[in-house]
Amino acid sequence: MTVASPSSRPQPRSLQEASLLEAPQLLLRKVRGLSSNRSLTWLACVPIALMGLGLFNLSARAAELPELNAAFLANNTFLLICAVLVIFMNAGFAMVEAGMCRQKNAVNILAKNLIVFALAATAYWFIGYKIMYNASWVVPGWFKFGGLFFDPTVTPEMVTDGKLVPSVDFLFQLAFAGTAATIVSGLVAERIKFGEFIIFSLVLVGVLYPISGSWQWNVGEGWLNKLGFIDFAGSTVVHSFGAWAGLVGAMLLGPRIGKFVDGKPQAMPGHNMAIATLGCLILWIGWYGFNPGSWLSMAPEVPYIAVTTTLGAAGGGIAATLVSQFTGGKPDLTMTINGILAGLVGITAGCDGFSMPGAWVVGFIAGVLVVFSVAIVDSLKIDDPVGAFSVHGTCGIWGTLAVGLFNEGKGLFYGHGFTQLGYQLVGVLAFAVFAIVTSFIAWSVIGAIFGGIRVTEAEEKEGLDIGEHGMEAYPDFASAK
């Protein structure tokens, strides 16, 4: 009996007619450009070549590096987990901001919070990291520049000494840079153009934040660090810096339509407190990457920092709830949310040096301050839809100054005089001035180039979801027109 060769067999015309062996080839043939056997042969070479290249790369690196030790694995795994926790805080920011704003702007807020981290990752990878770290000083102590991108090479010394590999360090620092940009979003919510916000975020993360951050977090090199300023995890470096940048934007934008009537602030309730509450809890969890991770290694101090962080949040939530009860007659959920976040921001600068009672007190005072700060910002006719400046700015400043009072080794309340408090004040003022001046220039230039940074009155009234994105967050619940 003669057996037909493969080429003489009738080719199946559909996947239903094809055998298990013939189906993949038939599927690939339906893709334009893959109709010949030669095309399919070359296509098959691609994954083989990539796999070979990857194995060669891996074996080459494995041959160069010593055996991975426990310290190297623990430190890098720990910081990678912390970086992921801080990145996940973007979900918390998105939920808090969206929940505390009106339904017609929910898509816009979610889109901003989602894209801002993509922007931060790109800008910080492209240039920001090499302005902030691992570069030569152009102006010693003040300005670095090391070109574009960063070198991810892992050296034998890193493994032997249990140090962080460049990629893990970059990812962790990037997460902080993204947080600074996200804070801005809350202050300018419900009336800023989407494109103009994107451009400002790129400038902030790529240039402005890295410059000021380099002053403090280059140990023994940055001018503020050499002075003696302390900001362990960023109450000022990250939080108040982002708050000042956002405040300038909010002032240039002006208040939302209807926010102030006859000079009096009007309530504009958020549309979903359940989402806002979820966001608060996500942020609280994410802070265990933010603060403990700032130790930059898996060390005995890490659990202690996690505890002081928890106590600060607890004190802030309790205080804000009590104050809202006394001032408004009933406990305000939005103030409880902001109080917890205020306590977290307040504890961030000194969480490694506060006693446990001191941590709770610092958080409690932050919770009191945030309630009154919201009222003061309103009295100044500044529209801050979610209380972002009060949480991150006011309480960032308080937490930084609190180091000069409550730090067990250098604080005034522990008998160490006013010196550290003076250093803390200098740092707070330096970041405020730099953020205000540079942000004003950036916002103004962007506005001049693109014809303003605020949406039209009609778009604002209809909602930015439709005006900026052409969609609604809850189309099934849209009111009939």
Image (cartoon, rainbow, N blue to C red):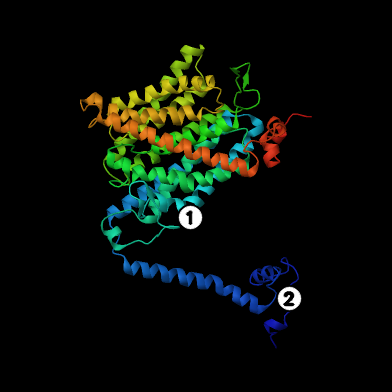
Which picture quadrant has residue 109? Answer: top right
The numbered mark at residue 321 is none
Image side of residue 311 versus residue 447, left or right:
left
Is 67 rendered above or below residue 244? below
Q: Which mark is residue 126?
A: 1
Please tell me which residue lies in front, 166 or 227.
227
Q: Which mark is residue 11?
A: 2
Q: Quadrant of residue 1?
A: bottom right
150 shown above or below 173: below
Residue 138 in percent (x, y) is at 37, 53
Look at 51% across and 27% down and name the residue there. 387
| SS for dot 1 | helix
Q: Is residue 188 visible?
A: yes
Q: Quadrant of the C terminus?
A: top right
Q: State the CA–CA distance, disc 2 to disc 1.
A: 51 Å
Residue pictured at 25% horizontal, 24% vertical:
413
Question: What amino acid type should be assigned to the residue bearing mark 2?
Answer: Gln
Specify few, some or many for label 2: CA neighbours under 10 Å numbering under 14, 14-19, or 20 or more: few
